[in-house]
Image (cartoon, rainbow, N blue to C red):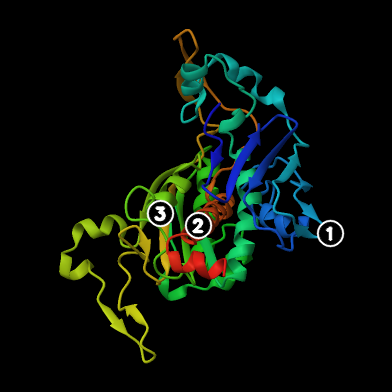
Amino acid sequence: MAGSGFGTIFKITTWGESHGKGIGVVIDGCPAGLSLEESDIQAYLDRRKPGQSGFSTPRRESDRVEILSGVFEGKTTGTPISLIVRNENQKSADYSEIASFYRPGHADYTFDAKYGFRDYRGGGRSSGRETIGRVAAGSIAAKILHQMGIRLCTYTRSIGPVEISPERFDAGQIRQNPLYMPDAGAALEAQLYLEQCMSGQDSSGGVIECVIDGMPAGIGDPVFEKLDANLAKAVFSIGAVKGFEIGSGFQAAEKKGSENNDAFTCDASGTIQKQTNHAGGILGGMSDGSQIIFRAAVKPTPSIARTQHTVRKDGSPVDIQIKGRHDPVIVPRAVVVVESMAALVILDALLVNMSAKLDSILQFYK
C-alpha cells in the first residue's frame, strides 16, 4: 500500500491496523536536541483515546505510547523516531459478520475494488484508530512550534445544528467538557442533541476549527506547495473529514471584493498588519503574519445501530444493523487529530522555508 507517508523534511510514516498488534509511526527529519519524553506524546494521545465519555466508543484502550528509537537521555538524536501504541482491547468477533457485505459510509467496497481483499476487523487501515500515529507525530511537531512561539488552539465549533457563540467564547472551557467546545452553554445544548441522536440509534457530524497564532509572514510557496493547499490535503487525509475552508471560506463567494479584501495598515512600531482577516492568514499560498484560521467539516459516524440497506459481495440485497463499539460523534476525538496534522504541515513548511533566501543559508553556515 502506497500513501502512508507525509511531509517533505519533517516526514512521517504511519503503520498498523485497528485490530492488529499495534499502531505506530516513524518520524524522520526531527532535529536533534529536542527534549522529549513519552509523557509529552501521551498528553496528546489522551485527548483522542476512546472511552472518555458517553459520547465516545466504550472500547477501553490505554493508548500508552512507547518510544522505540531516536531518543537518548531524554533528547532527540536526529535519527528516525519510532513510536508504538499496542492494541489491548480488540473484539474482532464483533466484525466477523461484515466480511460478507459492504457497510454504508465505510471503505469496505472501495478497498475490495482496489485490492480485491480487505481487513474487515474494524476497518483496518481505514479505521479512525490509524490517527494514533498522526497524533503522536503531531505532538512532537507542536512541541517544536511552541518553542518558536507558534501555538495552535483547536476546538469543536459545532455539533449538528448546535454552534458556539462568539460572544461566549472561552478557550478555558475546551478541556472542561467532553465535546471540546469553548462555549459551556453550547456544549450542554450539543450534549442534549447527541442524546437524542443516540436514542434514535443515530449519529451526528460537526465542524472543527483551528486557530494558529505566532506565524511569521512568508511561509509556504506560491504554486503547488501553497500553505493552505497543504493544510487542506493534511486535513482531508483524515478519514471522516468531508469539507475544508479557510478564513471566510465559502462565505467569500457571497461577498464583493470590497467586502472580502483585507486592508493593510501599520502599527505604532511600523509592523505591517491587516485590519481584517477574511483570508484566514494566508495570501497567495504564503502566511501573511496574522492568525491562520481554518475549519474542517466532519461527517456523522457511519457505524450506527439503526437498520440500513446495503448489498453483499455477490450483489444480493441485505438489511443490516452494525454491531460493535462506535462513537455516536467523531468530532471531539478528531479535534486533536486536526491540530496534529496542522502542526505537521506548519513545521514542515518552516523547515522548507529555511532555504528560501541565500542570506539565510550564508548566515547559517557563517
Q: Mark 1 — residue?
A: 73
Q: Mark 3 — residue?
A: 161
**Depth check, front residue: 17 or 267:** 267
- In the image, what residue type sits under mark 3? Pro
Q: CA distance from mark 3 to mark 2?
A: 8 Å
Q: Which image quarter: residue 249?
A: bottom left
Q: How many marks?
A: 3
**Depth check, front residue: 200 or 58:** 58
Q: Which residue occupies 62% across, 51% down?
A: 29
Counting other residues with Cα less than 10 Å from the Cα at mark 2, is it few (<14), some (14-19), or many (20 or more)? Answer: many
Q: Which image quarter: residue 295?
A: bottom left
Residue 30 point in image, percent of width and height: 64, 54
Q: Are marks 3 and 1 in contact (CB under 8 Å)?
A: no
Counting other residues with Cα less than 10 Å from the Cα at mark 3, is it few (<14), some (14-19), or many (20 or more)? Answer: few
Quarter in which the C terminus is drawn:
bottom right
Label 3 residue SS: loop
- In the image, what residue type sits under mark 1? Glu
Residue 185 visible in the shown view: no
Instruction: Say the numbered circle drawn on residue 216.
Output: none
Label 1 residue SS: loop
Q: Is residue 261 above or below residue 11?
A: below
Q: Mark 2 — residue?
A: 190
Q: CA distance from mark 1 to mark 2?
A: 45 Å
Label 2 residue SS: helix
Q: Which residue occupies 19% across, 58% down?
A: 254
